[in-house]
Image (tube, helix red, strand yellow):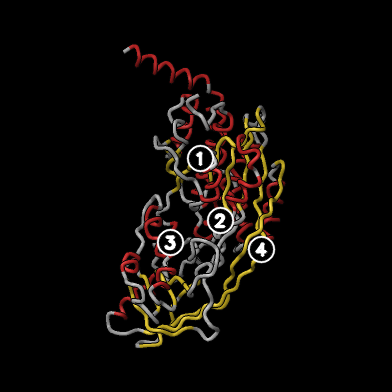
Amino acid sequence: MRCIIAVVALSCFSLSALAGDLGTAAALRDRALGDPTAYRLLESLTTEIGPRMVGSPAAQHARDWGIAELRALGFAHVHAEAFAKPSWARGDESAEVTAPFPQRLWVIGLGWSAPTPPSGIEAPIVVLKSYAELLAARPGAFKGRIVVVDQPMTRTMDGAGYGAAVEARYGVLEAAKRGAVAYLVRSISTSQTRAPHTGIGMPTAGLSPIPMAALGVPDADLLADMATRGAVRVRLKLQSFVRPNSLAWNVSGDILGSARPDQVIVVGGHLDSWDPGTGAIDDGAGVVITTAAAHLVGLLPRHPRRTIRVVMFGSEETGGSSAAYLAAHKAQLGKIMLAGESDLGSDRVYAVKLPAGVAGLPALAPLAVVLAPLRVFVSPDPAKSSGSDLDDMEKAGVPEFAVNQDATRYFDYHHSADDTLAVVDPAQLNQNVAAWAAVLYLAADSTIDFRKPGR
């Protein structure tokens, strides 16, 4: 009984001792719910810049946009860090059934697809129900055919369905080993529209051995249905080219800490996007959510103890941002106390996950109190990964936190022409900003060593 009383007393003392922090965090939360900054930024980015593939003129415009907006919002040390990498760009694309029932198909090339000859490729197809079926086939089994993998994706709140399905998008090497002349995959998507969803088709940069593309979900079903009636032939035209010496940029700015400005919490989203849509939810939303949240913290009369750094990562979709940021900041790595990325759209936050050993610390007890009115809970499970732009820092020892969003409808739109401002709910966008602002303020104002929380 004495132990229970002691624990209760400690919890009460912690909340009382941090009442000022609790009040400030609650005020930030409430202000964020009505603040127009995030939506204004997202409207500007998607309207004035649009899609932002690495190597395109729009990527440079996005860099300049990011620098200008961070400066206008009062961030310090605003700058861009360039890094070199190859880039891939699509040209004209088309596909059609030529027999037995001629009609157009909706396709989009996958990143790093080899081009077809200008006249295209025409060949019989073989439809497989899963990626596992492709792997089970013997070498040479599909010689001279176009392989179609029609594996559906499961809709889930946490995005786990995507993780289970996306391996099929990387099946081009396995299809080529089995003699295929091209590879088509059902879009990794929960949508029922004909808009196909693109994405990287090769695990590493470099052209695929055969052309590869994603089919709109109904068109994958159409081919599967046709194949039950007999042989099907498809003509595929995919044009693309590679720029071997492109540049990308990580753009960043700081809200300087009041007591330990050398200790940094790194947050952000990725500024690049695929080209069919305008990159609103992937990942313009993540960029503006973290920027707006840090900006609101920066408006406080007293900044939190530590610096909050917003990074607009320049090449997530085709890789490179993570390694480039680590390389540029390796000397300061020991001062990066915590990192988090927003890269799962703009729908409501439902949970926050902290580094292992942190969630139960009394100093962060106010976090659950502040987040509760947003219907967000602090999970007892530690964060495993917050975003791919942080992977190299995480491997180098920087602890991550995750602000988990509802991804139920995210994969209806991402990597497709439907990824536009029209699918963003402003109220849910601001709920994200509110959750991020509370987490950033309390984490930045704490004295917790997130690297060694037990000490």
Amino acid identity at mark 2: Glu
Q: Neighbour class for label 1 at 10 Å: few (<14), some, many (≥20)?
A: many
- The mark closer to the camera, 4 or 2, is 4
Residue marked by disc 1:
400
Q: Neighbour class for label 2 at 10 Å: few (<14), some, many (≥20)?
A: many
Q: CA distance from mark 4 to mark 1?
A: 30 Å
Residue marked by disc 4:
246
Q: Secondary structure at mark 2?
A: loop
224 sits left or right of 277 in the view: left
Amino acid identity at mark 4: Ser
Vertically, is 386 above or below 362? below
Q: CA distance from mark 2 to mark 3?
A: 20 Å
The single residue placed furthest to the front in the displayed view is: 139
Question: Mark 4 near mark 1, Cβ–Cβ under 8 Å?
Answer: no
Amino acid identity at mark 3: Asp
Which residue: 35% across, 73% down? 139
Vertically, is 22 above or below 16? below
- Residue 284 spot, x, y in % from top left: 57, 55
Q: CA distance from mark 4 to mark 3?
A: 31 Å
Question: Mark 4 near mark 3, Cβ–Cβ under 8 Å?
Answer: no
- Name the one closer to the observer, 288 or 382: 382
Q: Earlier in the sequence, mark 4 or mark 2?
A: 4
Which residue: 57% across, 38% down? 31
Amino acid identity at mark 1: Glu
Q: Earlier in the sequence, mark 4 or mark 3?
A: 4
- The mark closer to the camera, 4 or 3, is 4
Q: Which mark is residue 316?
A: 2
